[in-house]
Amino acid sequence: MSSVLGFTLPNSWSSAPLKHVTSTLKRGSAPTYVDAGPVRVISQASNQASGLDWSRARFHNFSGNPKSLKGYLCPNDVLINSTGTGTLGRVGYFTDSPDGLPCMADSHVTIARAKPDQLHARFSYYWLSSSLFQEYTYTALVVGATNQIELNRERLGDAPVPLPPLDEQRRIADFLDAETARIDGLLDARERHIALVKERWEATIYQELIQSRAPEVELRRLGVKVTTGPFGTVFNASQYQEGGVPMVNPLHIRNGSITPDLHHAVPPETAARLARHRLRAGDLVVGRKGDLGRAALVQESQDGWVCGSDCIALHPGGKVLPHFLDYVLRSQYIRSQLLAKSLATTMPSLNEGNLLSLRLPHLTLEQQDAMAERLDRAHDWLVRATNTMRKQLELLRERRQALITAAVTGQFDVTTASGRNITEGVTV
């Protein structure tokens, strides 16, 4: 009776090292990249868990027979990302290119080509992408440290592969093709649902502002003051340190919240020197470059953080409520104005004057407060609905992996099994 990675296999199954059931197990080769060429290159960025992303594939400058390339790909090759934390171990499957051009793997991708008389290619794909094998990859097959880790070819070659009879391998692969496709359809539907909920939220803010029918007024007329983060000799990135006082840049502003990278922090003495750029609870921070419309309200726990050079801090004053202004700044109502006032075409950017010239409905403090309360309730619904759907996504992904692992280790007979219970408790 055989076993692999702690799982006892059915009596009719055997196992073998991966190198014994593959005709090719090697890295690709380093390409000479060009904008357009005769050979497509699959890199780690192209090899995604959701499938090969051809928009990320580039071209190799080559003349001659592409089959002579070390990384030349054949239909049914399995591709394994082989370097770097976060991507190492990701498994893909090659059938053919979208336009018929020959393809190759680069030197960061390992090609595993199954021997068709011993190992079904799709079965090997599911085994290598199973959570069981993925955990084994990081515990036993990786060498190096931090982001310099890589997949050791010799250890990979010695890694075990469960081997049902070939016809059973085909049945398992066919079963998983059908069941994972069904689960992937549910995942896609839920992702679309989340996007629609976000669109509904955007529409709610827009309708609130439009339906107020209040005359518009420029931000500067409401007593709002602005401060841009420090430039040039005042501050430079060499002063960053881990810990210290966080410095906020646009990438730290996500979904209306400030989530700092603690590596982007300055010593307390530097923060004290940048006193005029310090943020106070009730201020708002707006990214002034790139993805315009990133804005967030500074919370009590963030009082004293520093506004980075690519952000502008808004200090509301007494004529506009910070909570109300937070909702307005993150709305399509304002985002369209931000884009219209952008100072650049390649990378949109803002300055203080353009930000202060933004127009919004001129409401009394009481009207602002009432609108903010209505938007609070709508936002609470958005958060609850989104959190529920994200938990469902996580559950579906976990069950998808559990199904794959159970099938490739023979925990059930796919000829009598159905994957329907894999989505039990998850509705779309």
Image: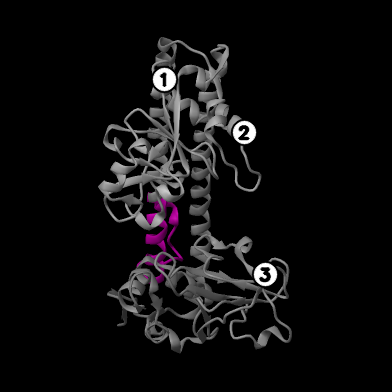
Label 2 neighbour load within 10 Å: few <14, some 14-19, many 20+: some
Q: Is residue 246 visible?
A: yes
Circle nearer the viewer, 2 or 1: 2
Q: Nearer the viewer, residue 179 or 226?
A: 226
Residue position for label 1: 372
Q: Nearer the viewer, residue 22 or 306?
A: 306
Residue type, mark 2 in image: Lys
Q: Compared with residue 245, is residue 227 higher up or lower down, i.e. above or below? A: above
Circle nearer the viewer, 2 or 3: 2
Label 3 to label 1: alpha-carbon separation = 52 Å
Residue position for label 2: 341
Label 3 neighbour load within 10 Å: few <14, some 14-19, many 20+: some
Q: Is residue 377 visible?
A: no
Instruction: Using the image, tell me which numbered label, if any, was put on residue 97.
Output: 3
Label 1 element class = helix
Q: Position of residue 357 (x, y in %)?
A: 57, 25
Q: Position of residue 164 (x, y in %)?
A: 43, 78
Q: Magenta part mainly helix, strand or loop?
A: helix
Q: Is residue 396 magenta?
A: yes
Q: Going by the image, does 350 lie left or right of 424?
A: right
Q: Nearer the viewer, residue 195 or 230?
A: 230
Label 2 to label 1: alpha-carbon separation = 26 Å
Stretch of the chain drawn in magenta: 395-423
